[in-house]
Amino acid sequence: MSPLAAIALGANLPSPAGPPEQTLSAAMAELAGAGTILARSSLYRTEPVGYADQPPFVNAAVALSTTLDPEALLDFLLATERHYGRDRTRDFPNHPRTLDLDLLLMDNLVLDSPRLTVPHPALAGRRFVLAPLCEIAPHLRHPILGKTVAELLAALPDEGSNRCGAVQKLSPPQGRH
């Protein structure tokens, strides 16, 4: 069986595909080029984290079965971001963007290379990532912390950028494939 990759999607600027909601829907479909999409979350409107002077984000998550190794999957994700107008050379932390794709988990893989860290180092502390991921894969286990996505989400404080009201479901689930 191919490894299961959990991917977070986010956007708060229009892309060539349209507004963030359309960008995420188009990007989710494009992820099928990297494997088989097993599940897609609802879309969530989320408040910006860190740099607050920007539009709200739209976030989602995808569970993908893939035969790509982590570095090849990262290359696919970066190429997809560029296709939707993202220029990482102009980025600053927590900046506005047309599309952000993050590899969150890949089975039980623990990897820390110059290009990629898996599991994603900020995964356990971000409601805007955990809420969509929990919708489609609550049982996935963080290979370092030993907790499921549902347990990580439940452990977040209901304050600041992690308060429940900062992450609001916009749409019904995109379906399982």
Image: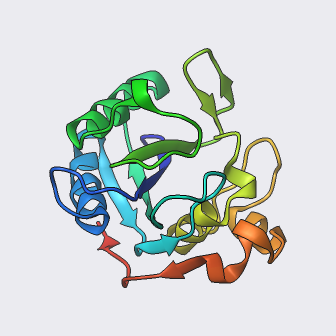
Q: What colour scheme has been applied to the protein in the rendered image?
A: rainbow
Left or right: 68, with 132 as reference point: left
**Residue 12 x, y percent position in the rendering:** 39, 59
Give the residue at x 42% y 29%: 90
Q: Looking at the image, which is closer to me, 136 or 23? A: 23
Q: What is the quadrant of the C terminus in the image? A: bottom left
Q: What is the quadrant of the N terminus in the image? A: top left
**Residue 166 x, y percent position in the rendering:** 62, 76
Give the residue at x 27% y 38%: 80
Residue 156 lies, with reference to residue 53, above or below; the image says below
Give the residue at x 37% y 60%: 38
Residue 2 lies, with reference to residue 159, above or below; the image says above
Q: Is residue 67 visible?
A: no
Left or right: 12, with 3 as reference point: left
Pick out the residue farthest to the top. Answer: 114
**Residue 35 x, y percent position in the rendering:** 30, 43
Left or right: 145, with 161 as reference point: right
Residue 83 lies, with reference to residue 25, above or below; the image says above
Give the residue at x 53% y 70%: 46
Q: Is residue 38 visible?
A: yes
Q: Looking at the image, which is closer to me, 91 or 70? A: 91
**Residue 67 x, y percent position in the rendering:** 37, 33
